[in-house]
Amino acid sequence: MPISAPKTTLKERTLDADVRCSQWLADGNEARESGDTAKAEKCYAKSQFWLDRYNLLAGKGEKPAPRQ
């Protein structure tokens, strides 16, 4: 069974992961500044997820980058 091409390019997925990581980090910083540490920790965890995803897509992780 042949594998079909992804609907979005690798560059688009990498950019999306970078933007989402930055947004979650900003939300976490805002929550920390307002004193909501529980929300801040959740935002930081989501930011870390998207950073890991970005590193995978950019080929900077332990696993090889996905195909184009």
Image (cartoon, grey):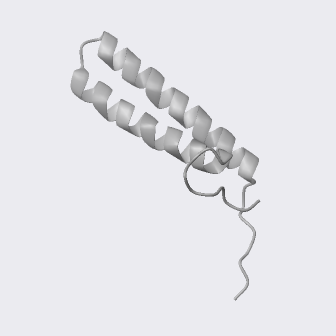
- Point out residue 23 in the picture as x, y percentages from the top left corner: 51, 28
The answer to whether residue 45 is above or below residue 1 is above
- Point out residue 15 in the picture as x, y percentages from the top left corner: 68, 39
Quadrant containing the C terminus is bottom right
The answer to whether residue 22 is above or below residue 65 is above
- Point out residue 17 in the picture as x, y percentages from the top left corner: 59, 41
The answer to whether residue 2 is above or below residue 65 is below
- Tell me which corner region of the image, top left, top right, bottom left or bottom right, holds residue 60: top right
**At x 57% / y 56%, what residue is drawn?**
63
How many numbered dots are placed on residues in this image? 0
Left or right, residue 33 beside residue 59? left
- Tell me which corner region of the image, top left, top right, bottom left or bottom right, holds residue 46: top left
- Point out residue 38 in the picture as x, y percentages from the top left corner: 22, 28
**At x 71% / y 78%, what residue is drawn?**
3
In this rendered view, identify the residue nearer to me: 8 or 67: 67
The answer to whether residue 30 is above or below residue 20 is above
In this rendered view, identify the residue nearer to me: 3 or 57: 57
- Tell me which corner region of the image, top left, top right, bottom left or bottom right, holds residue 22: top right
Left or right, residue 16 beside residue 53? right
In the image as oriented, which residue stretches furthest toward the bottom? 1
Quadrant containing the N terminus is bottom right
In the image as oriented, which residue stretches furthest toward the front? 62
